[in-house]
Image (spheres, rainbow, N blue to C red):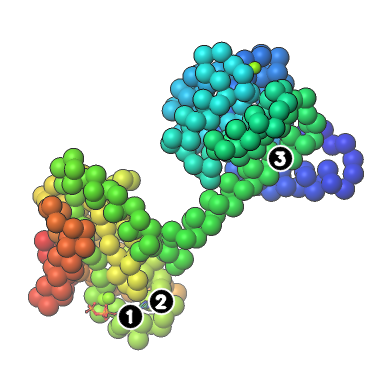
Amino acid sequence: YVYKGGINDINYIISIIKRLLKNRTHKVMVVDDSSVFRNQIKKMVENLFFQVFALAHGEEALLILEQNPDIKMIITDYNMPVMDGLQLTEEVRKTYDKNQLSIFVLSSVDSPEVSAMFLKRGANDFINKPFSKEEFSCRLNNAIEALENIETITNYASRDFLTGLYNRRYFFNTIEPYFSNAVDSEEEFVVAMVDIDHFKKINDTYGHDVGDKAIIHLSEILRSGVQHQDVVARFGGEEFCIVLKNTTRENAIGVLERIRQQVSLSPLMIANQSEVSFTISIGAALEHEDTLTDTINEADAKLYQAKSTGRNKVVF
Ligand code: GH3
Ligand code: MG
Ligand code: MG
Ligand code: MG
């Protein structure tokens, strides 16, 4: 970035530095059939510290997007051979909504109908060529900031504040669709409810702060005890729900048994090298073609059984 003086430019540089400090160097795709224009835009975007993919038409762009689903922005021309910018916009919007991937159109077709047509089909912004570089950079930064803000808000809404695990709302929003799919494709999965044994005693003996630390400690063991595709959510208090996807009963018992053992063998370390040991009880159910609520209720009943028959055990 070439500093041209003036207070606004300083603010602008600060906003870029802030983004770099957050280590957010997004992927941006530039799609234009004119190689001169494509390279010019590419350079401008690279100067703003984005990673750029430059392509000549929509079909190439879709291919690259498939290989890089984390691309945050597409800057596209309108008229191009093979697949134009409008078709590209329509195709991309079948998979990515405006809040996940920003589409920015640059076109020399200077007509209000064209810009409206793009915006109606899901483009986030539109500028006529030729345009001011300054305006382009500002709009591009605004679009990226908007995406980042939405990501932050979505994170707040879907995560539990104490542990960073998914919360109950996110759990049901994502597991409901997964559940219907799994039932259709006859994929088996297991729902497990986890609850700390005699947790009140930890709070009463060591205080609420240590209780919170125990919850965080457990959440780390749960997260690292399952596979990437599995879901771990905090339902409230010291109660968690795990979904082990695409698994069998035998496999799930192995995973849950290992987690139970690990909790009992890795006490929470607190001040003065004291250790707080605790155990967990787990109730689990294999999904069979009933409703998600039925499966969760069955896991809950099994958890109750684990509690009433001595705790520190997995009941399936
Ligand atoms: P059991 O073995 O039967 O599960 O006994 P328990 O003492 O763990 O009983 P229960 O599960 O009913 O205890 C829940 C307690 O967890 C009650 C509440 O004071 C405490 N609790 C709930 N949420 C939090 C939290 O966020 N932090 C802390 N420190 N304690 C919490
Ligand atoms: Mg063109
Ligand atoms: Mg408990
Ligand atoms: Mg409880």
Residue beneath disc 1: 202
Instruction: Locate the C terminus and report the quarter of the image it occupies.
Output: bottom left
- Mark 2 C-beta to ligand 1 under 8 Å: yes
How much space separates mark 1 and mark 3, taking CA atoms?
53 Å
Question: Who comes first in sequence, dot 1 or dot 2?
Answer: 1
Q: Is residue 161 visible?
A: yes
Q: Position of residue 236 (x, y in %)?
A: 35, 71
For residue 276, which numbered disc appears in the image?
none
Dividing the image into four equal quarters, which quarter contains ligand 2?
Answer: top right
Instruction: Locate the N terminus and report the quarter of the image it occupies.
Output: top right
| Residue plotted at (41% across, 76% down) | 210
- Mark 1 C-beta to ligand 1 under 8 Å: yes
Residue beneath disc 2: 210
- Mark 3 C-beta to ligand 2 under 8 Å: no
Q: Give the residue type at disc 2.
A: Val
| Secondary element at image label 1 | helix
Find out whether the residues at labels 1 and 3 contact each other: C-beta distance under 8 Å.
Answer: no
Relative vertical location of residue 311 with respect to residue 249 in this rendering, above or below: below
Residue beneath disc 3: 139
Give the image quarter of residue 120. Answer: top right
Q: Give the residue type at disc 1.
A: Ile
| Residue plotted at (32% across, 72% down) | 238
Q: Nearer the viewer, mark 2 or mark 3?
A: 3
Q: Position of residue 132 (x, y in %)?
A: 80, 31
Find out whether the residues at labels 1 and 2 contact each other: C-beta distance under 8 Å.
Answer: yes
Give the image quarter of residue 54. Answer: top right
